[in-house]
Each structure stands twice: as structure tokens, then as C-alpha cells.
Amino acid sequence: MVTGEGCGYLASALSSNPSSLLRDLDLGYNPLRDSGLKMLSDLLKEPNCTLNTLRLRGCKVTGEGCGYLASALSSNPSSLLRDLDLGYNPLGDSGLKMLSDLLKEPNCTLNTLRYVEQ
């Protein structure tokens, strides 16, 4: 089981290796919570982040975590992230609003956003 602390280790390893070829990260059904998503969002802000797909289904992420994610993707117009799965998380109306605002941005790179309510 990966927690927020484990996300910190993973994000640190990926950010310290600019030649990483990791494209697909599936952390589904791990209790990352918002603290873990904050650390992953810090990674997504980096211009050398190579992730195309991020699966966070059932990770106990709330609207707060959506804020971290939306902020990271908004601040990195060179993001390669195309596919995001946030299904089975209690995002709430505030989280969905932040994601909707992100999708309206002209430089949003997402092609697929998956969300299924709990």
C-alpha cells in the first residue's frame, strides 16, 4: 500500500532523474489522500515530467487535491499529461469546478478525464 509519504519518495525519485522514461503511473486504490497528490502535483509542475497517464482511482482525493492538480497543470503548459483517472474519489463540487476550469484553459493538454462518483 502506498500512502502520501510513499508518493513523496516516488515524486522525488522522478524529479531527480530528468532522463526518466516513465510515461504511465497507476497508483489506484492506494490511500494517497490530498497530501500524496500534492507531492505528485509538484512533480507535474516540472517541465521535464514525462507522465502521459496518471491513474488515481480510489485514492481518497478530495477537492483540495484537485486544487493542487489543477494548479500544477495550469502552471506547466509543456505538460505531457493526456490521460487522468480520478474515479471513485470524493472530489465534491469544489473539486469538479477546479477540474472544469482547468479544461477550459487553452493550453490544457488533457485528452481524457475519467471520473465516476463513489
Image (cartoon, rainbow, N blue to C red):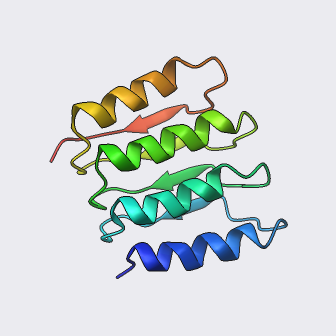
Q: Quadrant of residue 56?
A: bottom left
- Is residue 84 visible to the viewer in this orientation of the structure? yes
**Residue farthest to the left, as pictured:** 118
- Observer-nearest residue: 72 or 109? 72
Q: Where is residue 116 in the image (x, y as percent from the top left)?
A: 24, 41
**In the image: residue 47, left or right of residue 85:** right
Instruction: Name the residue located 15 percent from the left edge and 48 percent from the top edge.
Output: 118
**Residue farthest to the right, as pictured:** 19
Does residue 21 sit above or below 2 in this rendering? above
Instruction: Name the residue located 62 percent from the left edge and 44 percent from the top edge.
Output: 81
Q: Where is residue 40 in the image (x, y as percent from the top left)?
A: 54, 60
**In the image: residue 95, left or right of residue 24:** left
Instruction: Name the residue located 33 percent from the left edge and 56 percent from the top edge.
Output: 57
- Observer-nearest residue: 30 or 7? 7
Total numbered labels placed on residues in the image:
0
Q: Where is residue 23 in the image (x, y as percent from the top left)?
A: 66, 58
Instruction: Name the residue located 39 percent from the left edge and 78 percent from the top edge.
Output: 2
- Is residue 82 visible to the viewer in this orientation of the structure? no
Q: In which quarter of the image is residue 114?
A: top left
> Which quadrant does the N terminus fall into?
bottom left
**In the image: residue 73, left or right of residue 6:** right
